[in-house]
Every structure is written in C-alpha cells, then in structure tokens.
Image: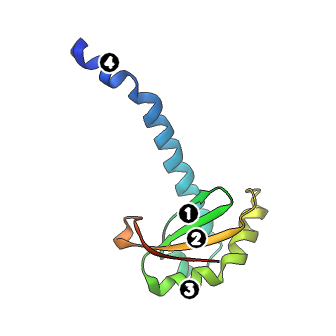
C-alpha cells in the first residue's frame, strides 16, 4: 500500500473491530429473542438490539408485530433469566425485506 494511503486506513481497525463486536452482540440477542418465541414467530425476527432499557425487535412484516408485542413480557423475563439488564420496554419495528430498516413501530 502506498504511504500516502496508510494514514487513511490506519485508524480503521479499531472502528471495524467495534462494528464487528456490535454486529455479533446484535446477532446473539436476536438468537435469544428467537429462542423465547414460538417457532412460527421466531422465524420472522429479522434483528434485535438494545437501546438503554429498551429492546427493539425487527420483524419481517406487520402481520407478526402484534404477536411479538404480546410476547413482550416473556421476552423480558427470558432476557432477565439470561442475566441481561432489565428491559422496561419492547418496541417492535417492521423491517423491509430483512434490511432492518423500520417502517413503523409499536411499543409495549
């Protein structure tokens, strides 16, 4: 790599490591969420993330958002049993085709 480009890439490693760690944590959280839901609903979970004491679950379509919302208490209890910090609110978003971009949300 030319010396003129090294300074551009030298600071990327820590940022990429943080991004990879965050992606891995989000994937583990989504897996835990899926495990706490009935199989037909679990298959519709696209992603999940924490925002403070809020859990955000992204589902494939609006048809599944109500079922995940109704499972909010069970999700909170399952995460607490796994030693996760308290979840005070579960928010469900509809992701467009698995992109994780919410087009709407419902809170519990």
Residue under label 3, please give it. Answer: 66
Q: Position of residue 43 (x, y in %)?
A: 49, 76
- Mark 1–mark 4 contact, CB under 8 Å? no
Q: Which mark is residue 30?
A: 1
- Please say if 44 is above or below 63: above
Q: Earlier in the sequence, mark 2 or mark 3?
A: 2
CA separation, marks 1 and 4?
A: 36 Å
Bin the neighbour count of mark 2 within 10 Å (Cα to Cα): few under 14, some 14-19, many 20 and up. many
Labels in figure, total: 4
Residue under label 2, please give it. Answer: 34
Q: Earlier in the sequence, mark 4 or mark 2?
A: 4
CA separation, marks 3 and 1?
A: 17 Å
Q: Is residue 12 left or right of residue 24?
A: left
- Mark 1–mark 2 contact, CB under 8 Å? yes
Q: Position of residue 89 (x, y in %)?
A: 67, 70
Quarter of the figure that contains the N terminus:
top left
Bin the neighbour count of mark 3 within 10 Å (Cα to Cα): few under 14, some 14-19, many 20 and up. few
Residue occupying image coordinates x 54% and y 81%:
41
Q: Secondary structure at mark 3?
A: helix
Residue under label 4, please give it. Answer: 7
Decide which of 39, 56 is in the foreground and name it.
56
Q: Nearer the viewer, mark 2 or mark 3?
A: 3
CA separation, marks 2 and 3?
A: 15 Å
- Mark 3–mark 1 contact, CB under 8 Å? no
CA separation, marks 4 and 2?
A: 42 Å
Bin the neighbour count of mark 1 within 10 Å (Cα to Cα): few under 14, some 14-19, many 20 and up. many
């Amino acid at each position: 790599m030319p010396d003129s480009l090294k300074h551009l890439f030298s600071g990327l490693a820590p940022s990429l490591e943080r991004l990879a760690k965050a992606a891995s944590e989000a994937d583990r959280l989504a897996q835990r969420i899926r495990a706490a839901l009935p199989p037909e609903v679990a298959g519709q979970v696209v992603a999940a993330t924490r925002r403070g004491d809020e859990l955000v679950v992204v589902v494939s379509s609006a048809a599944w958002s109500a079922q995940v919302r109704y499972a909010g208490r069970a999700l909170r209890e399952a995460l607490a049993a796994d030693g996760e910090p308290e979840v005070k609110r579960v928010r469900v978003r509809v992701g467009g085709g698995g992109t994780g971009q919410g087009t709407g949300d419902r809170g519990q």
